[in-house]
Image: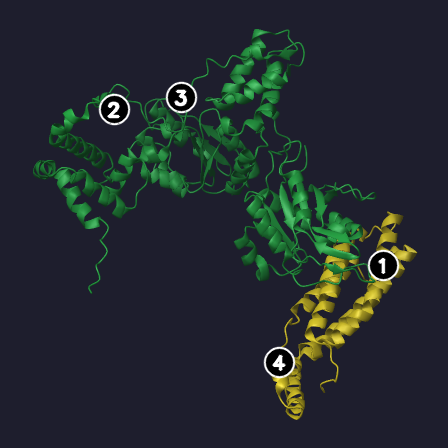
Amino acid sequence: MIWKINPMKNRKWLELRSRLHHDWLQNSYITFLNARADHLEGSLRRSEKVRLDVKEQFAEWKEKEGEFRLFFQTAVDALSPAQLLDEPPLCQMTHENRTWLKELVHALFVVNSQIEKRAELLSAEMEKISVTQSLLMQIISMEDNLLLEQNDVSFVSFRDSVLEFSRKISDLPHEVQVV
Amino acid sequence: MSLPLILIIDDQFGRSLKDRRNLCLYFGLIDITGDDPSTEEIKNPVCNAIFSSGQKIENGRVTNDIKTVFSSLKTGWPNSEGVFWSLVLLDIRFVSGKIGNSGEPHGQIGDTDFGLLILSEIIKFSADVPVVMLSSRERHEVIEECRKLGACDFIQRQTNEKTSFQDILRTKILEHGLIEDLRQGIDEEFRIIGKSLTMLKTLRSARRAATGKGNILILGETGTGKELLGKYIHDVSPKKRGPYQIFHPFGTAETLQEDELFGHIKGAFSGATREMSGLFESAHKGTLFIDEIGDIPERLQAKLLRPLETRIITRQGSNRQISLDFQGILATNKNLEEYAKTQRFKFDLLNRINSFSITLPPLKDRPEDIPLLAEKLVKDLCRKHEARWPRKILPETMNVLKKHHWPDNVRGLKNVLERAIKANKDSELIVPSDIDVGVEEKKTHIHPISKEENSPVSDLEKFLIEFDFPREYSKISGKFPALRKAIGNLLANYLIAALEITRKRKPEANGNGDLNITGAASCMIGKQLKTPNAADLVKKIMQFDEEVLNEFLLSNSTLKEAYGESLRLRPKGRKKHGN
């Protein structure tokens, strides 16, 4: 992987991470899933108010998908030690030296850290969650318990997969990785 | 029964009603903040909750604000009804800054640890506020710092644990919270009344002690409710479904006390016509409450050592060992440490029962509980005496009750109210003149150690206290050498008495036992000394007068031994550095 000209810097990426993962996914969306998953299991017809609430909060996931994609795509750059060469004291090196050194440390980082692979896996996991959520949304809209049984999905297992997704995001490093 | 009341300080759940509703459903909270018109019904709620964002919003900016936190905190420490926050749940990260298009602030430096700043300020305000941190961060990342700053515990908001969050929160409230006696389904007569901070902390200690294993020592003046607290411990412990047995030593001969506790086999003694189990066995899988442990005779104290340590007993007349599983609760109004120092109570037994002790506060230390207690007692007493109508206590009467020092504690309060009710059966009111506190005695404190009131020691004590030197001090100057010798004699004899009293004797060993310099010196001055300091004190006492010292070293082997030992143990002087 080649070091980009204007990559996302670690600080910006951490801000995105805080907003997206901590503030929204953990504090808001997972709290919603924890609050509703057990209630929803097998009781779709009980409350119109609850169904509306669930649909509204499911819709938020769709809004956040784009930001999550950006977050995963920029993980490698944001954690790469190459950016340290743009900051003091390393930025005082000659442009020529910095250029080849950046390429080198970035390439070493990519090979050693496996961040690229982890980000790709997380991205795929997110797409899977999106598909399951769309199905659950459809089931809720149609109030169709039969469809729920036929597709072998459950609100609780959906909640657990989102929890696992969040745990894996938490495991991503926060700081620039030194090779 | 009322629910505990908690304060949740969290930026997001304080601000966003949508997220807060989800949290309430998830944790089983009834939101009584008053700013959400459409709260959902919560089934089996855990507690009532008030939310505070800890922030203020002005001109499109969110600012983290300690003042906002404190204006919320102080509404419940305590509130207008005297109720304290049962628990404070505190977030760590508070996002502030300019509000963006999403309606949320962008965040700024200082947000990440603002919760820790709040925590340290709360603990500065009162270290008694039970704060549990609530965060999505990993426990191991933050627990150490939070504990150092004074938090009781940490709850991670997102976890894959199978335990429901409602159960987690219930457990944390029981473990760390300041909550009244909320037991359900008990006879109201056994409920512990009190919402003062002192009492709430005592109840919390009791819940923490109630592990269902080991021994718990309840200390407290007479009439403070030690037996009620014993039952409370049993009811909140894992042994609550087991039996609860009570042993009172008073009014029973020593041999019968042993029989009551240990039981016997047929033929164990004359009259033992059939096998019988004792209270230890009856308490198996439950709790045994031994009242007035300080008054149990020495021989029986020795017999209690084994069952209280190993949970193994043998019935009288039998060799068969019976293994038991019970929670031991022991209560006394005596100062057992003092008793042990003067050999009225076995040190060994004290060590076995003292691992978790709870002191019940006297009523004078929790006057704010007197109105609640008085109302409840009057209700119970009216029922007992079949009063024609409920009795009301006038505010002036309540003031009289609140100002009294209540040496006999709740029992004394009950007696006074009972007299008031009996004296005027047809009245609707209890007025100040009905309250007769004159006959309550002023004696039952936790140091009732002076039983030998008429001994020569008491005479000496009286003489020393009352003795007054003549005001013409010049006339006594010539008496100083003789006085010094007399006082030296007295001190040496005082020291001999303390040394003899505190000798360490092993049950199986012959002889007088070993000298205990530390114990003797501590006993003399009434506080626990470290060994070098105790040795120094003994040395100084003996060197008070050189002539006396020489006489005693020749004539008294105890003092001779003690002097040698004190010289060996005393603090070493600082070495002078040479030039």
* Eye-nearest disc, 4 or 3: 4
Query: Do discs 4 and 1 share a chain?
Result: yes
Task: Mark 4: give few (<14), some (14-19) or many (20+) Cα within 10 Å.
Answer: few
Residue B461's disc is: 2
Residue at image point 63% right, 54% down: B115
Colour in which chain A is shown?
yellow
Colour in which chain B is shown?
green
Q: Which chain does the residue under circle 4 lie in?
A: A
* Eye-nearest disc, 3 or 2: 2
Q: Nearer the viewer, residue B185 or B65?
A: B65
Q: Is residue B132 left or right of residue B551?
A: right
The answer to whether the residues at label 2 and label 4 have Cβ atoms under 8 Å apart is no
* Eye-nearest disc, 1 or 3: 3
- Quick check: B402 above or below B242? above
Q: Is residue B150 left or right of residue B510?
A: right
Distance between the Cα atoms at labels 3 and 2? 19 Å
- The C terminus of chain B lies in which quarter of the figure? bottom left
Which amino acid, by three-letter code, is at mark 4? Pro
Residue B363's x, y, as percent? 51, 26
The answer to whether the residues at label 4 and label 3 have Cβ atoms under 8 Å apart is no
Distance between the Cα atoms at labels 2 and 1? 89 Å
The answer to whether the residues at label 4 and label 1 have Cβ atoms under 8 Å apart is no
Distance between the Cα atoms at labels 4 and 3? 77 Å
* Eye-nearest disc, 2 or 1: 2
| Image quadrant in which you'd find residue B108 | bottom right
Q: Which residue is mark 3?
A: B443
